[in-house]
Amino acid sequence: MSTQDEELQNKFLAGVTDDSLDGIAYKKVFDAISTEPHFNLPINFADKVVQQLETNEANSTASEMRWLAAGIFLLVIGAVVGAILSGFRPSFGAFKFWASYPGLFVFGLIFLFFIQWLDKTIIGKGLKIG
């Protein structure tokens, strides 16, 4: 709150009238706050609100899953159409490189398993995950 707002609030609480626009606005706000509403909420109002929110959340989740499935389906269809129109032919020629270096392939596999083990034993214990 700014100093001017605090001064207006203190004036209003002290009973001093302020005919400025801000003073009139403060008077309306404090009058509205000081009066109780003329209606009573049912006892189970909060339960009904929570139930409605849960229902809306369940419907929202189902709707999101349908949109996700539709998106994945359209992505696959687009990939197939793109592959057909571009004349894509799958080739495993890139993997012929590994035939010349079997030791590098084995080293890579062992290194990956070592990194996984290291993560599980040292880092996982520090994070209290594993």
Image (cartoon, rainbow, N blue to C red):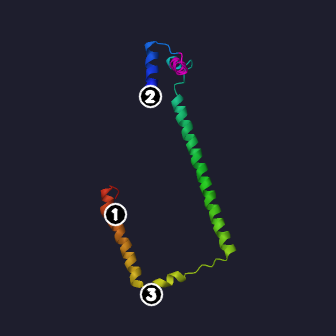
3D distance between C-alphas at marks 2 and 3: 75 Å
Categorize mark 2 by other alpha carbons within 10 Å: few (<14), some (14-19), many (20+). few
Q: Are marks 1 and 3 in contact (CB under 8 Å)?
A: no
> Which segment did they paint magenta?
19-31
Which comes sooner in the sequence, label 2 or label 3? 2
Q: Quadrant of residue 113?
A: bottom left
Residue 21: give x, y in percent of width and height: 55, 20
Q: Quadrant of residue 84?
A: bottom right
3D distance between C-alphas at marks 2 and 1: 54 Å
Q: Which SS does the magenta portion mostly show?
A: helix
- Judge whether 89 appears above or below 29 on screen: below
Q: Determine the residue located farthest toward the right in the rendered image.
A: 85
Q: Are marks 2 and 3 in contact (CB under 8 Å)?
A: no
Q: Which is nearer the eye, 121 or 97?
A: 97
**Residue identified by numbered label 2:** 2
**Residue identified by numbered label 1:** 120
